[in-house]
Image (cartoon, rainbow, N blue to C red):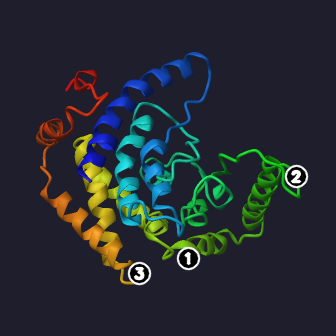
Amino acid sequence: VGGLLFGQAVLGGLDMEWMWTQIVEIAKKHGCIPGGDTNCAEANTAMFMAGGFISKDVPHTLAALSRAICVSRSLVAYECGATGPSKDCAYEDPIIKSITGIPIATEGKTSACAHSDLCGNVIGAVCDLWSNEAVEYHDMFGASTTAVFTEILGYDVAAMNSSIDLGYQKEFQACLINSDRYRGPHGFMLCPDNAWEIGKAVVDNNESLYVRGKAAAVKCGELMLGDPNLKLTNFEKESLEAYMKDLEALPDKEEDFIDLSLKKYGKVKGFKPASYGL
């Protein structure tokens, strides 16, 4: 988990600051909207490897902690001037929205073609735009895969908009949340109340990229361990308890954590600390 904090929160956050400062300037120059970013490369990879019910390459609890940590990184885009709508594959977006209030795009059940995630309903609970991704092209009985999944997406959007038109948006939202709340750790931590708690931990500990990333992970772990209705297998619970001990043992200050991480990861192939000013 220390490696996730170093790679996602610290190095990832520095990458984001370097890149998004330039993106915002370019967007303003050309009259474009600097939307937002996603931690697809790391947090989504962890979610993909957890694999819904079909895989167990990493624990779902670790994937959830990775999602919480990545908030520190994705948030940098908005601190640099991104305005939303956010990137749809950023499953951390409900937490980002709780901090910034920016409009978010999310994807869920209509992206089951790309990954199994166990949070395909709840991720739509606070979205402003609904999307999908990564539909591999094939022919199906109905039409091509792209046409079929676009039709499915259209039904989702029509149902969401109709719930607003009929005044049932809160009831519809409650169905989206409660249908996934206890399906798994990822859906649980993305429920609006838990997303808000994790976002608050980030804001309350906004001393550095590392400190706020660690605070998000600790709060996420506390929430998962603190709700008896979230049923975890022995493997998932023991893994989470071990990660929490690891988090507790990490330094309080970012500079001390960076020194520790450079000793551990400084010789990783392709990693150049000097590129980050470290």
Provide the residue designation for mark 3. Answer: 231
Question: Where residue 155 sits in the image (x, y, percent)?
Answer: 79, 61
Q: What separation in Å lies between label 2 and label 1 (alpha carbons)? A: 33 Å
Which residue shows up at 34% across the image and 43% down it? 8
Q: Label 2: state its secondary structure.
A: loop
Task: Indicate the quadrant where residue 170 lies.
Answer: bottom right
Amino acid on which disc 3 is placed: Lys
Whether label 1 touches label 3, CB < 8 Å: no
Provide the residue designation for mark 1. Answer: 178
Earlier-in-chain disc, 1 versus 3? 1
| Residue furthest out toward the right | 142
Earlier-in-chain disc, 3 versus 2? 2
Provide the residue designation for mark 2. Answer: 143
Q: Label 3: state its secondary structure.
A: loop
Question: Where residue 260 sits in the image (x, y, percent)?
Answer: 13, 41
Q: Quick one: quadrant of the C terminus?
A: top left
Q: What separation in Å lies between label 1 and label 3 (alpha carbons)? A: 15 Å
Question: Where residue 32 sits in the image (x, y, percent)?
Answer: 61, 25
Is label 3 or label 2 in front? 2
Disc number placed over residue 198 in the picture, else none: none
Is label 1 or label 3 in front? 3
